[in-house]
Structure formats: structure tokens, C-alpha cells
Image: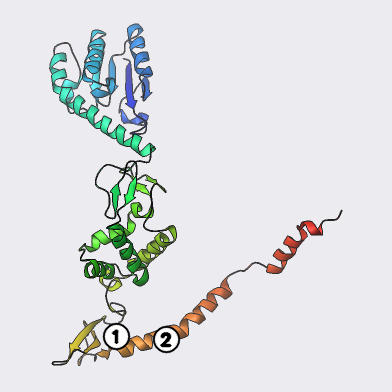
Amino acid sequence: MKIVAYVYSDPLLETPPERSIWGWEVDWVYQDLGGRQALEQLFQDCQTDPPAYLLLRRFEELGDSVPQVWDRLVQLEAMAVKIIALESAVEPDDSILTRADLIQLLVTIQTEVQTQHRRQRIARGHSKNRLKTLPPPGKAPYGYRRGKDRYVLDRSTAPMVKDFFERFLIYGSLRGAVRYLEQRYGKKISVSTGRRWLTNPVYRGDLAYKNAAIVSSTHAPILSREESAQVDRLLRRNQAIAPRSASAPRSLAGLVSCQECQSLMTISRVTAYRKTREYLYLRPTNCPQKPKCKSLPYEAVLSTTIQRICQNLPQAVDQLVDQLILPDMGKIKAGIQGRSPTNKEF
């Protein structure tokens, strides 16, 4: 019993499937990439030595339209070739074609074939747009508008987005940048939207498509390459800190723990009656001791922390520099002078 398979793949939409997808012992696989040469060869071979079964992924791979699919199904049925479509929505018993159910099967798969062909035409058009580096379908990101063949900066909203990025680059706080955008411009966005802005390739002058492909330098960016690298570094740094701590208005939020009870300390704010001045304290959140550990003045702890950093940071940097293996500048200088044209002997 001879079993063959036919598969059609559009190189703009997918990669050719592997031979193991059939689950049958296949004698020969006819494969087309964008054309129909292998399909024509299949029909020529069927006229001389027809197989018992023809395996397909879907019925629509036999043609580019419903009439083409119907014509080829009739030809295969006339040669007594039974067809099995593995991925078709038709029931398995109906996927094996005989003369009795051929017409009924066409009615069943007609909508399926039309829908699949329409989906492929749309996806093929999107793939061609990617090759031409045209923007993907849909609304342009905030700060841009759709031009003729690329995104164009929106003069009314692009400065607002630029200011948001600069605020984040200065303070490294996502929630702070979101609050600043609302206070300065009255533009309310969620924190998740702000994070999408920071990671969106469009603001860096690139295009991102549905298949995860990124095309670089397709339009005017709002973020430069240097600023984009700094944004990525800040986002990676903030991953090690709790989200609320990374974006909190206080520098020590979520970073201080009690030396006695090892409990994390939270910031408490106290105001005096009819006075605008406020007092900040650090107090343990889950102190198991009795009596509980006392609160600490926030400003005193912050000042001590800054002084300790100023003392320890230069020493840590010096240790890192000492551990680095630096090249011998004397040998490099001598080598350059030796290759200089003025040192050649004539």
C-alpha cells in the first residue's frame, strides 16, 4: 500500500513542517514553497502509479480558491485516491473521500477553505509590509501618528512622552514618572502602560511585529540609543527591588531592616496640629520583641546612610580597579611607534 503526502507552505507565513508530523509511514512527500510545481508532479505520478492514500494537513492546500480545491478533489477521486486531512475541522470519517460523500464534503469544507484563504491573504499582506518596513496595522503608539509609509512624530504629544522618559532617566522611578505626567500635563496613565512605553521598540525608532521580529531604524525615535540602554539598565536594577519600593517617593522605602529584630521597617509620617511641617520615622512592621523596638528618625538614618556610602564607595571602586588586569601601556606604545612610517629603514 503506497502512501504519499503533500504539503504547501508560503515562505512569507511559515517554515516548512518536519517529516514526522504525519504519524504515518509515508513513501514520498511532495512539498511546495509558494508555487505548485510539486502538486503538478503529484498528479502526473498519480496517473501512472496512483497511491492508496494522500495525506494533507488541510484541504485548502490543494489550491488557492474553492473551485481549484474542488477540481483537484474530483481528479483525485477519479483516480481512486483516498484523501486524509489531518488538521481539518471535518470529522475523521468524512476526511476519507469516496464518491458518495464527495459533494457533501465540499459543502462542509467550503466555508473552512474560504476562511483559511482569506486569513492567508491578510497574513501575506502583513508579511509584505514587513519586508517593506511599513508600520503594522492598528493605531499608532501615543506620541506618533501614521504617515504615508512610516510613523511620524506627533508634535502635540511627543514632547509629553519625551518628558516622561527624561523624568524616569533622572530619578529611576516608574511610578514617580507616572505621577509627574499627571501633575504636569494632566495625562493619566497606569503604571503598566508606563512600563510598556519604556520597553516599546517604537519609541526607540524600531518596528516590532506580531511574529516578534524587530526592524531597526525605521522612523524618528523619541529615545536615543544611549537613553534606551540607560532605561534598560534602570529597569534591570529595579527588578531586584519591590515595585513599590523602586518607585516610592522616599529613598529608604523598603530598604531598611531593624538590626535587633531583623524586621523590615516602614516609613511613618506625623504632622503637628495646625502646622505644615511633617516628621518622618522608620518603625518595624513585625517586631516580635517585647517591648517592641523603638522608631528611628528618618532624616538621621538617611544622613548616616549617605555618609557611609560616601566612605565605602571609593574604597569598593579602588578594589575593583586593582582586581582588573590592565594592559601594559608601555608595550602598546612601543609597538605603535615601531609600526610608524617614520621608524622604517630605507
Amino acid under label 2?
Answer: Arg
Q: Is residue 243 above or below residue 128?
A: below
Q: Residues within 10 Å of mark 2 (few under 14, many from 20)?
A: few
The quadrant holding residue 16 is: top left
> Closer to the camera, 68 or 164?
164
**Quadrant the N terminus occupies:** top left
The residue at the point 16 percent across, 21 percent down is 94
Q: Identify the element where label 1 is drawn.
A: loop
* Residue 281 appears in the figure: yes
> Closer to the camera, 128 or 316?
128
> Closer to the camera, 127 or 258?
127
Q: Which mark is residue 308?
A: 2
Work out which residue is located at the far right of the displayed protein and give it. 346
Q: Position of residue 87 (x, y in %)?
A: 23, 29
| For residue 177, side relative to residue 204 (left or right) | left
* Residue 87 appears in the figure: no
Which residue is tagged 1? Answer: 258
> Marks 1 and 2, Cα distance to the nearest angstrom?
17 Å
Amino acid under label 1?
Answer: Cys
Q: Is residue 135 above or below residue 291?
A: above
Q: Position of residue 53 (x, y in %)?
A: 28, 17
Q: Position of residue 125 (x, y in %)?
A: 30, 33
- Give the mark nearer the N terminus: 1 vs 2: 1
> Closer to the camera, 151 or 239?
151
| For residue 51, side relative to residue 89 (left or right) | right
The residue at the point 35 percent across, 33 percent down is 12
1 and 2 marks in contact (CB < 8 Å) = no
Q: Identify the element where label 2 is drawn.
A: helix
The quadrant holding residue 186 is: bottom left
Q: How is the image coloured?
A: rainbow
Q: How many marks?
A: 2
